[in-house]
Image (tube, rainbow, N blue to C red):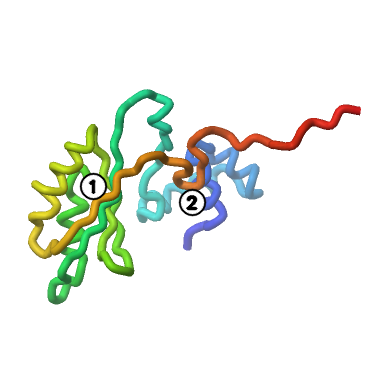
Amino acid sequence: MFNKEILKILERDGKLTPGQIAAMTGSTADEVGKAIKQAEDERAIVKYKALINWDKVGNEHVWALIEVKITPQRDVGFDAIAERIYRFDEARTVYLMSGTYDLAVLVEGKSMQEVAEFVTRKLAPVEGVTGTTTHFVLKRYKEDGEIMAGKEEVKRQAVIL
């Protein structure tokens, strides 16, 4: 059984040390370290990552959300086609969705042309893919619970006595 309190703390800030988490939870650093190791070994913790605001770095990136309609296959449903798609380097995230389309694929590229080539040369020809719709991300306001423009400011005026 995983310690959900530790996992929630790490989900918000993966840079915290076992000692810092121990102080927050009332556990020992050794207990926290063991809980983290177990979660990593069993892939409850899949990866630690930084959320980068690429607009501030000045690095041109194009992001697209591609809706994909597929024909499920006997005995494996959507999984085999989803696996073929998530193995492409360009596919950063792949979700099975309800609604009109079956998969949502988040793709990163250097240009709109590069993303378009991925769709036309790699994604659309996958056997079982019956349609795609590409939406280019124009601006990221909030991602993974974080406001991308910066810290929220208090908009009240200071009271001077």
Camera-side mark, 1 or 2 = 1
Disc 2 element: helix
Q: Nearer the viewer, residue 134 or 122?
A: 134
> In the figure, is residue 110 to the left or right of 2?
left
> Which x, y percent locates residue 156?
74, 37
Give the residue drawn at x 17%, y 37%.
Answer: 114
Check disc 1 and report the residue beneath it: 91
Label 1 to label 2: alpha-carbon separation: 31 Å
Give the residue drawn at x 13%, y 76%.
Answer: 74
Residue farthest right in this picture: 161
Q: Nearer the viewer, residue 113 or 79?
A: 113
Please report contact status of discs 1 and 2: CB closer than 8 Å, yes or no: no
Q: Residues within 10 Å of mark 1 (few under 14, many from 20)?
A: some
Give the residue drawn at x 63%, y 49%.
Answer: 25
Marked residue nearer the N-terminal end (1 or 2): 2
Check disc 2 and report the residue beneath it: 35
Residue farthest top in this picture: 58
Q: Residues within 10 Å of mark 2 (few under 14, many from 20)?
A: some
Residue farthest bottom in this picture: 74
The amino acid pointed to by label 1 is Ala
- Above or below: residue 128 compared with residue 42: below
Give the residue drawn at x 84%, y 31%.
Answer: 159
> Which x, y percent locates residue 63?
30, 41
The amino acid pointed to by label 2 is Ala
Q: Quadrant of the C terminus?
A: top right
Residue 103 found in image quarter? bottom left
Residue 155 found in image quarter? top right
> Which x, y percent locates residue 8?
53, 52
Disc 1 element: strand
> In the figure, is residue 102 to the left or right of 46?
left
> Which x, y percent locates residue 12?
52, 45
